[in-house]
Amino acid sequence: MGQAPRLRSVCVFCGSSDAADPAFLADAAALGAALAGEGLRLVYGGGGVGLMGACARAAHEAGGQVLGVIPGFLTSRERALESVQTVVVGSMHERKMMMFEEADGFVVLPGGIGTLEEVVELLSWRRLDLHAKPIVFHSPGDFWRPLFDLFQHTVERSLTPPSFLDAWVEVDAVEDIIPALRGAKRRGPDAAAAAAQIT
Ligand code: AMP
């Protein structure tokens, strides 16, 4: 097992809704500014809407490096930001793969079905030991509790191994996200080698 890579780039999965709780939008912006302040590059879905737009704008305005990855058909619907470096890819699958490859760690902010889809795939790769990159859920007001309960339910029914419950770290304050990423236990094979196994 090799050395886990140093944390340089952080992928943020989060909601694209502008109608989200203003506190969630403010937290997303605070995370973007904090990433910039720590010299960490933000990798995100490329849109200018909802939490993702708030996070990316704040990171960019604070002088941080930002990489957006967006499929061509979503550039107008998710209002891709012109002010940041954006790669336009051909499909949702390509988007997720590039976001995965470009990041050393992942943050999951409140989101909807798209956020769920992205993080469940990431966790399923972890379950298969295909990567060991840290995953931190920001769960203000226990936002993600129903999802954690569902995971626990599958463990209780012997469909998922109990060790899976160590695959992520949960925090409820924005300022705890980056320390949790840095301190999150990295299990499984070396992340870079593992990434090569995912096709
Ligand atoms: P939502 O949480 O539904 O607001 O979606 C958040 C982000 O996830 C949006 O940028 C969506 O385009 C994205 N998304 C939704 N489904 C997928 C998918 N299958 N693959 C990659 N990204 C997705």
Image (cartoon, grey):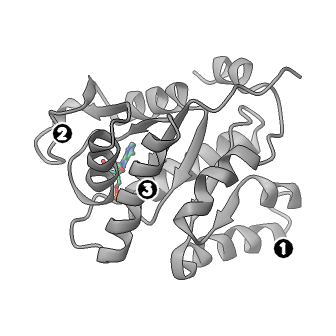
Tell me the residue at 44%/66% (across/down).
Answer: 110
Image height check: is 121 above or below 82? below
Tell me the residue at 18%/39% (across/down).
Answer: 80
Q: Is mark 2 within 8 Å of ligand 1?
A: no
Q: CA distance from mark 1 to mark 2?
A: 42 Å
**Which of the two discs, 1 and 2, sits closer to the camera?**
2
Tell me the residue at 35%/44% (across/down).
Answer: 59
Residue placed under numbered mark 3 in the picture: 115
Comes first in the chain, label 1 or label 2: 2
Badge 3 marks a residue whose secondary structure is helix
Please state if 52 lies on the left or on the right of 81 as rendered. right
In the drawing, what numbered circle is on residue 156?
A: 1
**Residue in front for this viewpoint, 6 or 98:** 6
**Which of the two discs, 1 and 3, sits closer to the camera?**
3
Q: Is mark 3 within 8 Å of ligand 1?
A: yes
User: Where residue 49 sits in the image (x, y, percent)?
Assistant: 21, 54
In the drawing, what numbered circle is on residue 166?
A: none
**Which of the two discs, 2 and 3, sits closer to the camera?**
2
The three-letter code of the residue at mark 2 reads Ala
Badge 2 marks a residue whose secondary structure is loop
Residue placed under numbered mark 2 in the picture: 80
User: Where residue 149 sits in the image (x, y, percent)?
Assistant: 68, 76
The three-letter code of the residue at mark 3 reads Thr
Q: CA distance from mark 1 to mark 3?
A: 25 Å
**Residue in front for this viewpoint, 191 or 150:** 191
Comes first in the chain, label 2 or label 3: 2
Comes first in the chain, label 1 or label 3: 3
Picture quarter containing residue 173? bottom right
